[in-house]
Image (cartoon, rainbow, N blue to C red):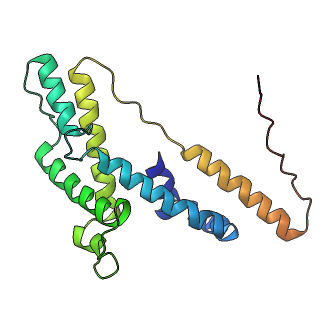
Amino acid sequence: MCHEAWWFFTGTNPNRERIVSVYNNYLNLFETIRPALYTTFIVKLASVFDNDEKSINLKLVMKEIEKATNTNFRTKPLDFDDLWKRGRRLFKYRNRVIAHRDKQVMSRNFAKETNFSYDDLKRILEDVSTFLDEALLFIGKGKFHKFSNKSDLEKLINDLSEVAQQRHSGGRQIAVAPYAKRWVS
């Protein structure tokens, strides 16, 4: 869901003008959140392309399915080798720029070297989701449930937009409730 939230603030949206207005009214907050969402998106997505034998990755999923079913598992709608190749490029970007911070990060443009666009990143995510759906169907489970936080983000933008309008118009201020007390046993 972090990719959806990151894209909500970064990508195209029919309510873009309102989003930008709220973003600019709460700039310090959103300038912290947006890169954190992107970083989380890249780290989580790239993790399924880790070659470490101790990691859970797409190749391990394929291997375990084949071992459990004693059959050769291949996804129909996508080329796994192509997905793995693109994912490994993403994993290298993750290592050099986000997770481990290569010492050449200031002198080289690793993002440009990967030649990824935002659409390419979304395509990798969609292909991973397709792979997982196919894997679940192959072993007799239902498709992977896709969560969405879009309606919550839209509500957040609407609420913050109203607060900003009231603050700027000198209207009634909205009181923000204090943190709820935690129940202690």
Foreground pick, 54 / 45: 54
Q: Is residue 133 above or below residue 46?
A: above
Q: Which quadrant of the figure has residue 55? A: top left
Query: Residue 79: in sight, yes or no?
Result: no
Q: Position of residue 78 (x, y in %)?
A: 16, 42
Q: Residue at x 24, y 37 (%)?
A: 131
Foreground pick, 143 / 183: 183
Say which quadrant the C terminus sits in.
top right
Q: Position of residue 59 (x, y in %)?
A: 17, 38
Horizontal side of 148 relative to 25 (left or right) equals: left
Q: Residue at x 44, y 53 (%)?
A: 40
Horizontal side of 43 relative to 16 (left or right) equals: left
Q: Residue furthest bottom?
A: 107
Q: Residue at x 13, y 17 (%)?
A: 69
Query: Residue 44: in sight, yes or no?
Result: yes
Q: Is residue 85 above or below residue 71?
A: below
Q: Residue at x 47, y 49 (%)?
A: 2
Q: Position of residue 46 (x, y in %)?
A: 30, 51
Q: Is residue 53 above or below residue 159?
A: above
Horizontal side of 24 relative to 104 (left or right) equals: right
So how many labels did they put on this image?
A: 0
Horizontal side of 29 relative to 61 (left or right) equals: right
Foreground pick, 32 / 149: 32
Q: Position of residue 156 (x, y in %)?
A: 66, 51
Foreground pick, 99 / 89: 99
